[in-house]
Amino acid sequence: MDCDPLPEFSIIIPTHNRYEKLRNLLESINRLELKSLKEIIVVDDSDIKEDISSFSDGLKIRLISVDFRIYISHAKNLGLQAASTNLIFFIDDDNVVLESTFNFPIKLLSENELIGAVCPSVLYRNDERIVWVYATPFKKHRWGHELIGRNQMRNYELENLVMDIDALPNAFASRKDTLQAVGGFNENLPIYNSAFLSFSLKKKGFRVIAHTGSFILHDVELPSNFGFWAEHEIPDPIRVKIEIRDWFTFMKVVHSEERLFSIRAVIRSLSFILPNSAVYLLRGKKKKFELVIKEIEGALEGLKNTR
């Protein structure tokens, strides 16, 4: 499919143990025949490596293979360092792109230096009528993000808008020099990098926005499944620990002046720790107790790190 001419850009895809989803993503990119796409940089820290050449035919792929797990922040930094273009589009491996995914975000960035990052809105791949999220601004109390449209049917009154946001889920476009100006992705937050990057960009005076007329499809369980939100965590107890630890660390940055931070953080965290624990116990099978233990360990380490 021939898209409107765009400035030259690179795509960076971190991947870990999800080759089938990576295949779907690469095939969706290939179908678009993006003439301005200079390269795709895949940063692979999977436990057991597979040859991706069989499903990357026709794409200009540069593979960075790492023999140990480095997590997404480090993986994105490696991709950023390797990129040969200034315009960059980061995509998590469990997504599929559409014709609308790239055009508007890339054009916005290339035409406005005050915009630091642009993300497309997200629909479910398994049912494109359902919104994964349109945009992610902070909630008023700033202890989490407002997930606009989350798990609702598409609302066309909310589409084709530009919204200011505070997190960059799934995919986003930015510039290499802009990201380098804020130190890239914070590797002290191995997983919780999207919100911290948005926070850093805004502190530097950049806008961080979602365009609700650009879309990407998230290849995850539908919300009709019990515990759908924990799909990635259930097989990965170490990720559970790091995610919760990262949340406490990031919240301390956001609420650095707040009195009684630890007490407030624990109370706020229960809103996701308790339902997550229920899901782990009911869906975790042999790992269910390990998942709950790692969740507790992550919270304790997070609290310790914020003292």
Image (tube, grey):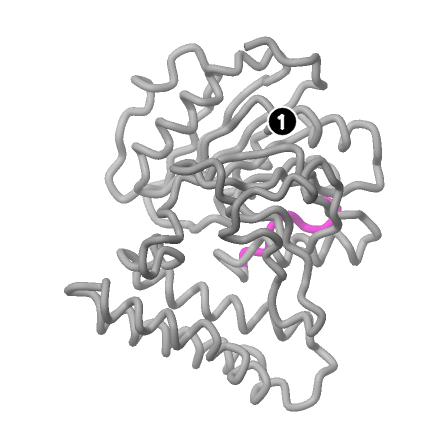
Residue 36 lies left or right of residue 181; in this view the side is: left
- Please give the name of the residue rendered at 67% of the width and 70% of the height, measured from the top-left corner: 142
Q: Amino acid at mark 1?
A: Phe
Residue lying at 60% horizontally and 67% vertically, measured from the top left: 144
Residue 23 counted in the magenta span: no
Q: Give the x, y percent position of residue 286.
A: 15, 65
Choose top left, top right, bottom left or bottom right for residue 261: bottom right
Determine the secondary structure under disc 1.
Answer: loop
> Which is nearer the eye, 267 or 125?
125
Q: Is residue 250 above or below residue 299?
A: above
Q: Quick one: 173 or 143, which is closer to the camera?
A: 143
**Mark 1 highlights which residue?**
102
Tell me where the magenta segment starts and ends, as one range.
180-187
- Residue 219 in picture, x, y percent from top left: 40, 39
Relative height, residue 176 to residue 33 (above, below): below
Q: Within the magenta stretch, is there residue 186?
A: yes
Q: Main secondary structure of the magenta part?
A: loop
